[in-house]
Amino acid sequence: MIWLWSAILFWLAAWAFNAWAARQPFARTRAGRLAIPALFGATLLVLWEGVVRGLEVPGVILPAPSVIWGTITASVPILWQDFVQTILKGGLSGYVIGCGAAVLTAIAIDRSPFLQRGLLPVGNFVAALPIVGIAPILVMWFGFDWQSKAAVVVVMVFFPVLVNTVAGLAATDRMQRDLMATYSASYWQTLMKLRLPAAMPFIFNGLKIATTLALIGAIVAEFFGSPIKGMGFRISTAVGQLALDMVWAEIAVAALAGSAFYGLVALIEKGVTFWHPSQRARS
Amino acid sequence: MRSVLPILAVLLAIVVLWYGAAIWLNSQWTYDQAGRAGVEVSFGEVVADTMVQERPVLPAPHQVAAGLWEGVAGQKVTSKRSLVYHGWMTLSATLVGFAIGTGLGVLLAVGIVHNRAMDMSVMPWAIASQTIPILAIAPMVIVVLASVGITGLLPKAVISAYLSFFPVVVGMVKGLRSPDGMQLDLLRTYNASPMATLWKLRLPASMPYLFASLKVSMAASLVGAIVGELPAGATSGLGARLLSGSYYGQTIQIWAALFAAAILAAGLVIIIGGIERATLRRMGMGQ
């Protein structure tokens, strides 16, 4: 019981400290912006550990963070093998193919208002559908290895990126295009020098949404059949053996990979769209 | 209405492409069968055969439509083969999860807007948690809840709620902050309490944002319910149909379940769109 109470006490104390710290000038600095959420995250972990130990929750329902950390350090080779299979081979290759195809398609249909009016509503509709459902079909077509996972990812990321890119290509205003016309710029010059750069904030919005979808697609597709490695495979078999510490270890890796992937895309966005108000305001 | 023709053209193109792909993908099996039987088949016979196979690689659109019709109208509603029955199982979990997720999301957003400490500590984690493939833990949630004795509707609803929760938080925080300084100052000159400001200014101003995120979270919550049905053990629901179809190679069943899910998603989003239009017009914000 002592574990439970001390964890709750720690959580309340940290929360009070956070409430106090958020009102200080320190909270406006860069360090404060990082420290306060980090402290909150740490309190959640402590609370979790305290509740599991204090109430003696069995490991098959919820393992404590310390146990999960032990599993992670003990099975690095397995986790690394699954990471390579699912994220690098399945997720990343599908992400690159899907996003590339979507941007190229958007540029291709950009010249035809007829196709745009027809494709945009259909694309918006498809983007809202439960596309994960095609995973069993694609696994049937492309086999159990990473190719089928990449195919699922391609389909999942295609429509959000397509819709955002088409919206982005329409983002320039008449004045800017007129200016290009007075320069006697060709279609391709206008595209490369004005419209694609202007579309970048929209494209990156789509790319950021697609990072999460790519991971989900790659992992969920493995529930429908996979070789004996991969994060989805490991999760579904470990659940079957009630080895929940292994499941949580995979989830931790997936969360870390997802955040890193998102952060990487956000970093590239910062470099490419440095001129956009949403990027300028913060620095 | 001027976009009806282009949409129809695109849909027609998709159907034509689909038929072409069905002939191309299914012809392999036909050739194999003919080769084994030792007969020559003409191209016309191949095309005719690819349209009516039992377990095609890619069912032709009319086969899927027939499968869908068979599942919806050809069975008693209570039958295990009826798509209405499975659709209802999924829909009920979706709606319960959507209600829980939306309620929690709005409450959390109100807290975030009114409490600076909560804003600084919770908001970054809410955004970071979006980057985590939550769906991947769906099987674990199901199994763990089942081992505590909770089965049936609720575990699926929990996953739905988790997925539909974050779009609402992010959208509502944006919406509750959308009143500009002038409007907030006006309420301050009225000596309005934070509660009154919330009810009379912030909540009404957030409605357009709320509906935009409701559409996203409804779609997400349906995906959550379907994925929640994937782990072994679930015998009813559209996700279970997908899984059993993929185990037994019943491609038509998979496609029919997929289209039923798509129609369900579209219907739900359209209903929210209708409520949105009516509400916004009533509030004087409609177009």
Image (spheres, coloured by chain):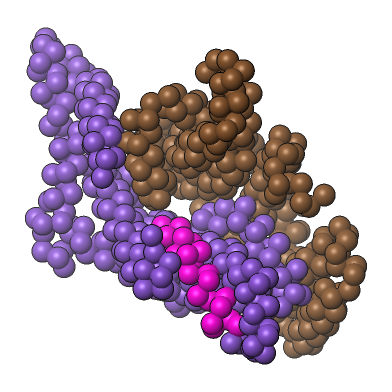
Image location of residue B179, percent across then percent down: 60, 70
Kindly report the secondary structure that dominates the magenta region of the rendered protein: helix
- Asked whether B244 or A211 is in front, the reply is A211
- Asked whether A222 or B66 is in front, the reply is B66
Give the left or right position of residue A191, taking residue A249 as reference.
left
Image location of residue B171, percent across then percent down: 55, 63
> Which chain is in brown here?
A
In the figure, residue B79 lies in which quadrant?
A: bottom left
Image location of residue B34, percent across then percent down: 15, 16
Q: Which residues are magenta?
A: B197-219
Q: Is residue A172 above or below residue B127?
A: above
Is any part of residue B268 visible from this angle?
Answer: no
In the figure, residue B178 lies in which quadrant?
A: bottom right
Chain B painted colour: purple
Q: Is residue A229 above or below residue B231?
A: above
In the figure, residue B76 lies in which quadrant?
A: bottom left
- Asked whether B261 or B181 is in front, the reply is B181
Q: Is residue A95 above or below residue A232?
A: above
User: Residue at image x 63%, y 82%?
Assistant: B187
Give the left or right position of residue A236, taking residue A250 as reference.
left
Give the left or right position of residue B92, taking residue A33 as reference.
left
Q: Is residue A96 above or below residue A157?
A: above
Confirm whether the magenta stretch covers residue B217: yes
Is any part of residue B204 visible from this angle?
Answer: yes
- Asked whether B252 or B249 is in front, the reply is B252
